[in-house]
Image: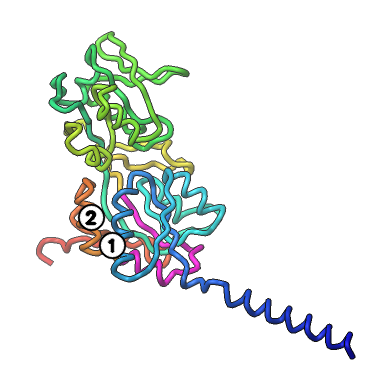
Amino acid sequence: MKRFGFFMMVAAALITAGLCAGCGEKNPEDKPLVFYVGGTMQPAMEELAELYEAKTGQAIEIDKSGSGVLLNRIRLDKSADIFICHDPFLEELMENKKGQLGIDAWTVSQITPVIVVQKGNPHNIKGIGDLAGKGIKVAVTDLDYSTCGHMLPTMFAKAGVEVVQEEKRVYLKKDGFEKDIVTYRSGSRTADTVKNRKFDAAIVWDAVAHLRGDAVKVVSIGKCLPLPGLDVDTITSATEKVRDIGRIRVTLATLKCSKRLKAARKFAEFIISDEGQKVFRKFGFTDIGGVVKEYEDGKKVVPQTAPAVGT
């Protein structure tokens, strides 16, 4: 009888331990939403996440990296709920060869290349062509690993400057004169070379320049910017599709792998709201005049067109 009582006590202890372990597990609905954020969008998304958490109590966990890096992680680890990136990654998310990865998607803003120069503009730089001048130290983002970098040959060509990339050298060529320039993978690091007065000028996104505030001066690229629908790039995408580099969208998507899709959709609705749009403008993104729905339930949304005159 003593041995039987001992076994009963052990069994009861094991059952109790199992129940307690179950009680300690978090309900998936109580966990933070996992928000994948492309690097350029991070400061604005941090503010939006803080505003949303204060308003709803919903915790947001931001995971940031390059947009392409995050896209690969969505393919592999399937742990995120929502993703914000810039072109050309939305179509790769929605048209993945091994199965669609996104559900609903919107264009929420846009980014545009600008020139940043030192405060006071000591070299009197007025446009992208001036960067080929002697004595001006120039930094740009990597021609192979950044979308802004892919746009550089088109923009410089419009100013009569050739961008040449060799194995260990990137340089500008104009009227027989050659000048080396320096490249970085990070737009933030590129802009900081001017903020810290190490370089005289850099080309970065407007939202990246905006974060440097009064430490730099912004010079428009103007007529040398790529034109929507006319200037294209075939190598920014792993799918080798032609991409329009005249308009670099900032896009938001809910993800098929989300385990909290309802909560992810509510957060997305907040980001695309008027309040969310104010934050994009506050952080220096290019204003597009409103949100555009790109995909709904995984299907491409047909753009709305104005009725023909006289109908």
Is 259 included in the stretch rendered in magenta? Answer: yes
Q: How crowded is the residue under tag 2: few (<14 C-alpha within 10 Å), some, or many (20+)? A: some
Is 261 included in the stretch rendered in magenta? Answer: yes
Mark with earlier residue (1, 2):
1
Say what amino acid the circle numbered 2 marks: Val
Question: Percent position (x, y) of residue 169?
Answer: 41, 17
Q: How crowded is the residue under tag 1: few (<14 C-alpha within 10 Å), some, or many (20+)? A: some
Which residue is situated farthest in the front direction here?
A: 2
Question: Percent position (x, y) of residue 245?
Answer: 31, 40
Depth check: give the residue in front, 136 or 177: 136
- Give the residue number, with chain letter if any, for mark 1: 51
Specify the segment rendered in magenta: 250-269
Q: Are marks 1 and 2 in contact (CB under 8 Å)?
A: yes
- Give the residue number, with chain letter if any, for mark 2: 279
Mark 1: secondary structure: helix
Please give the name of the residue rendered at 26% of the width and 14% of the height, measured from the top-left corner. 174
Q: Is residue 97 left or right of residue 44?
A: right
